[in-house]
Image (cartoon, rainbow, N blue to C red):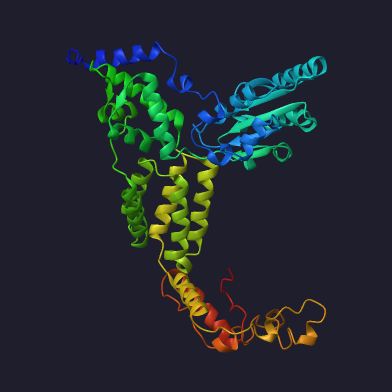
Amino acid sequence: MSRPSARPSGDLFTAAADERLRQRGPLADRLRPTSLDDVVGQGHLLGPGRPLRALVESDRLSSVILWGPPGTGKTTLARLVADASSQVFVPLSAVTATVADIRAEVAAATERLGAHGTGTILFLDEIHRFSRSQQDALLPSVETGLLVLIGATTENPHFEVNPPLLSRSTLFRLEPLDDVALTTLAERGLAAEGAGATPEAVAHLVDHAGGDGRHLLTGLEVAVALAVGRETDPVTVELADVEAALGAALVRYGRDDHYDVVSAFIKSIRGSDPDAALHWLARMLGAGEDPRFVARRLVVAASEDIGLADPTALLVADAAARAVDLVGLPEARINLAHATVHLALAPKSNTAYVAYGRAVADVADRPVGEVPAHLRDASYRGAATLGHGLGYRYPHDESGGWVDQQYLPDELEGTVYYEPGPHGREAALVEQWRRRRARGGGPEDGEPTG
């Protein structure tokens, strides 16, 4: 039977939720796994026979770097390693620890090992915050095995961790939690809170978690507190509670939307509409789409739809993709927006894409012949007796840097796959190419060479 349904005023409602949250520890801490089997996600590391599980279960862990986005379980895994190990676990945060702290822990580890034969695991959270000199202070102890280092970082360790330290550690990359793992986490959180939730509420939490389990549980905890304030029995989290907790209105983005929205995104870039492309980009990122997926689509579009019309487009898209790993969200949204606008504004050409398709079809559909003798590898002993390389003319020996000779197999001589387009930089590149061939090669005065 429902209790009185009178809803308190906004201020009282919020105050009641705040009071409930203050009375209990954070949900994410209360749900921290106590065994490897309790961990959601990271099956590529923790599944049966997988590398990290094997090392932990055999208590043979050497120094490791755990690299992954926030809320993927780096700290949890470090603590589980400690629980399964016979060594002493010492946690430090790179935000507050100093070189003096490191030296003190090295001294303590030396005494511990000498007096009791017990090793030390040093967990260094946010290791990317350590300066080069601070990381160097760790190196001798890691190198000798006095300390087993577990470093956790959200940043690419190839950029942020000293190469000597990285080379002495095993790198494990943690992936953002997928929808299945996040849903499991939400169900555990609801059970711990003694609450239920509508499917729409759970789906909205999962969609907006961005692969971050801690973010999901924090939002869920606030949503439950809001649901309790409505004084209904049983406590049921509704979509409005989740929206209020996350401060985000519902963005409908199911499996079909994933394909439809990215299709609209690419077609808007292809159609040279930067406003529409930015709209779809915002829709994807707002719905929790993996930014690496967006970056991959931009890299493909740079070659498929822009190509030779603007050769810099691929460089911009590639740089944005690298920035996603280096910078991460939320800042990487700026890099993705930069690349999106550049690609939308760029002149368009799909000639390289189409030409490759023609070559693929040709290779699949008809006899393509052997490599012409003059193009075959002539670098090994006996190649000349087989006629390999005979008659080949080295273009760099010619005054114009180009020579007219056959490069296709005899069966395909004269075949044309690439048909130039008239747009952007491609037209100029092709015109220069044609002029060089007509006069025997070499750039004209004032002609760009790159």
Point out residue 418 in the picture as x, y percentages from the top left corner.
48, 78
**Residue 322: where, in percent of width, then height?**
54, 48
Name above or below for residue 355 compared with residue 102.
Answer: below
Quarter holding the N terminus? Answer: top left
Could you tell me which quadrant the C terminus lies in?
bottom right
Drawn side of residue 232 relative to residue 103, left or right: left
Asked whether, in this view, residue 385 is left or right of residue 28, the answer is: right
At 76% from the left and 86% from the top, the residue drawn is 386
**In this rendering, would 100 be left or right of 195?**
right
In the image, residue 293 lies at what x, y percent? 45, 49
Q: Position of residue 212 (x, y in %)?
A: 45, 34
Residue appearing at x 45%, y 31% in the figure: 213
Front residue of this view, candidates 414 and 395: 414
- Residue 151, placed above or below residue 357: above
Q: Hey, which quadrant is residue 190 in on the image?
A: top left
- Give the mark count: 0
Towards the viewer: 76 or 34: 34
- The residue sitting at the front extreme is 48
Q: Quadrant of residue 248?
A: top left
Please tell me which residue lies in front, 32 or 395.
Answer: 32
